[in-house]
Image (cartoon, coloured by chain):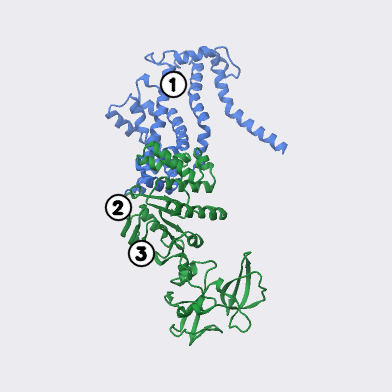
Amino acid sequence: MSAINITNVSKIYAGGVEAVKSVSIDIADGEFIVLVGPSGCGKSTLLRMVAGLETISKGTVEIGDRIVNTVEPAERDIAMVFQNYALYPHMTVYDNLAYGVKNRGTPKAEIDARVTEAARMLQLEKYLDRKPRALSGGQRQRVAMGRAIVRKPAAFLFDEPLSNLDAKLRVSMRGEIKQLQKRLGTTSIYVTHDQLEAMTLADRLVVLNGGEIEQIGRPLDVYHSPASTFVASFIGSPAMNLLRANREGNRLHFGSQTLETDRLSTLPTELTIGLRAEDLRIAQAGEQSLTLKIDYVEELGAQRLVHGNVDGKAITAALSPEIELADTIALTIAPSRLHFFDPTTGKRLPRPLDACTSTLPQATMLEPAAG
Amino acid sequence: MQRAKLFDHVILLMGVFIMIGPLVVALMTSSHEAADIHRNGLSILPGGHFVETYQTVLTKQGGFTGKITGLRMMMNSLILGLGFAAGKIILSMLAAYALVYFRFRFATITFWMIFTTLLLPLEVRILPSYEVMNTLHLTNTYTGLIVPLLASATGTFYFRQFFKSIPDELLEAARIDGAGPFKFFIDVIVPLSKTMMAAIFIIMFVYGWNQYLWPTLMTTDESFFTLVRGIKQILLVWVGSNIPDYNEAFALAILAMLPPVMIVMIFQRWFIKGLTESDK
């Protein structure tokens, strides 16, 4: 168990492609960090550099207080869980679990104790004599995790470990991973492209885009104040609606439609406005609103996703299924729930309403994530 | 449905007759006396001299020096076949391991160079090979018989393709588990290649067993004669009024066929597995 410090790490491939660009993350002891981003954003490369499977082009990686740039993977005191499990197909579950510790010259009695302990934790006791091919996907995934646990490493590295499982199993394994990590208190880095997995697992999220960090923060902080339009559209499902708007005084013009709030005067006149689908609601009579022409509706049971357009710009709203829908509906949003972004850089602009959030009815304080 | 089944059986049976027929004839003919065969030609019914013929073939000391027996030839063939197969597997596995898992300069070119030698039959390089062995004084030795033919483009190619199909994550997992290149090879690659090894073993055993030209060239000492050469030797006595020992030739042919057939039958399941599935 130890902290991991990633300092100005870059990965430059032969040919000059820079997959990871000067990334720095300080990971506290016992923290669960999730690297999330679309494919090709460098998240796996970064993880593999920490694991020692890729060389580090620039910068340093410290595990504990030791710079491990040139240390062999086996000596880094880490364990890795792979997407396709990477179990040794010819070995029994027991041997798969024991292989790593056996190679370190651990005495037989201790190997046995550790394997039994890990198998008990993961409910694999019954399967110790089986070969991986006789196991289901979820069981294989558990064996892969068991192999990591048995090592008692300073850090767990997860490389999209749940991507090969079906949706239902993914949810339950997600819970298991979270619980296990809390129980063992081992520092973990988890790579995923699934924002839901990222939100639910992470103590802190690292959103990567094009090899650079877009934002680091606790899941709810990232959700409530995304640092850029990229993060805004990546975190949260359905994705945040992003609309271009012109500001005139305290008025926001979305094409021909207008919303008016106060204290917008500090913002530039050209804006990208972010509206979370779940913050949109049906306007009461007399309230100012945007008129949404409904294109189609997705029923989710508890929610209904209404896809439509405001003056030709696509908008998705998550509404209660009890609400009667017409062809067009009037939507409104609490001013405190608006997100403002610079339309050219995509960076978040401070919310001018922050000072008075407590006076607005819909506003809630941003809850920091527990822990 | 029923008719289709019948038809299938007819085709299969025809196949069986065509394939097995000559073997049965050879087996049956070998149980007649040489003079009989000379007079009546091949026969499909058993003669009465089965045990005698095979006993003679296996134990009679023949050849110019009068020391070589069928048993001896069989052993030589076995040594050649097994040495071939084992040596080729070891060598081509190591070569393929190097090609796939180690990044050295010119790896691709090396591979293609090995690969193109597939196109060259043994006969092309048989004289230079002989010359080398001769200079090293390795003619009339098992070493000389086996070693020059061990490098195998076919084997290297098959193993390379197989190793490439093993997921990289397995190597990475092993690296994290603290297995070095040697340990990874022994602990992971070798057990995973079992079926592949069986397949290559069969191919190479039969190849080695059936070698004719190379042993003929390499060995003049009769104690190194192989079965395949022995058959030829029997028919060579046709001078004057001598009748060649047809029965013994047939018996030898049958004996020469048995081990490859047995190997194929025993390893059949693995063979097919090795060539079709990559047990991952």
At which x and y percent is residue A325?
66, 74
**Quick check: do tags 2 and 3 share a chain?**
yes
What residue would you read off at disc 2? A70
**Dot 2: few (<14), some (14–19), or many (≥20) neighbours within 10 Å?**
few
Chain seen in blue: B
Chain seen in green: A
Q: Is residue B13 visible?
A: yes
Seen as rendered, the residue at the extreme front is A359
Residues marked 1 and 2 touching at CB (< 8 Å): no
Residues marked 3 and 1 touching at CB (< 8 Å): no
**Quick check: do tags 1 and 2 share a chain?**
no
User: What is the distance, in whole Å, between disc 3 and disc 1 at their CAs?
Assistant: 68 Å
Nearer to me, B109 or A31: A31
The residue at the point 58 percent across, 81 percent down is: A289
**Dot 3: few (<14), some (14–19), or many (≥20) neighbours within 10 Å?**
some
At which x and y percent is residue B189?
41, 40
Nearer to me, A231 or A185: A185
Kindly identify the amino acid type of the residue bearing the numbered disc 2. Thr
What residue would you read off at disc 3? A21
Q: Chain of mark 1?
A: B
At which x and y percent is residue A359?
51, 80
Q: Secondary structure at mark 1?
A: helix
What residue would you read off at disc 1? B74
Q: Nearer the viewer, mark 3 or mark 1?
A: 3
Above or below residue A339? Residue A298 is above
Kindly identify the amino acid type of the residue bearing the numbered disc 3. Lys
User: What is the distance, in whole Å, between disc 2 and disc 3 at their CAs?
Assistant: 19 Å
Q: Chain of mark 3?
A: A
Kindly identify the amino acid type of the residue bearing the numbered disc 1. Met
Q: Secondary structure at mark 2?
A: loop
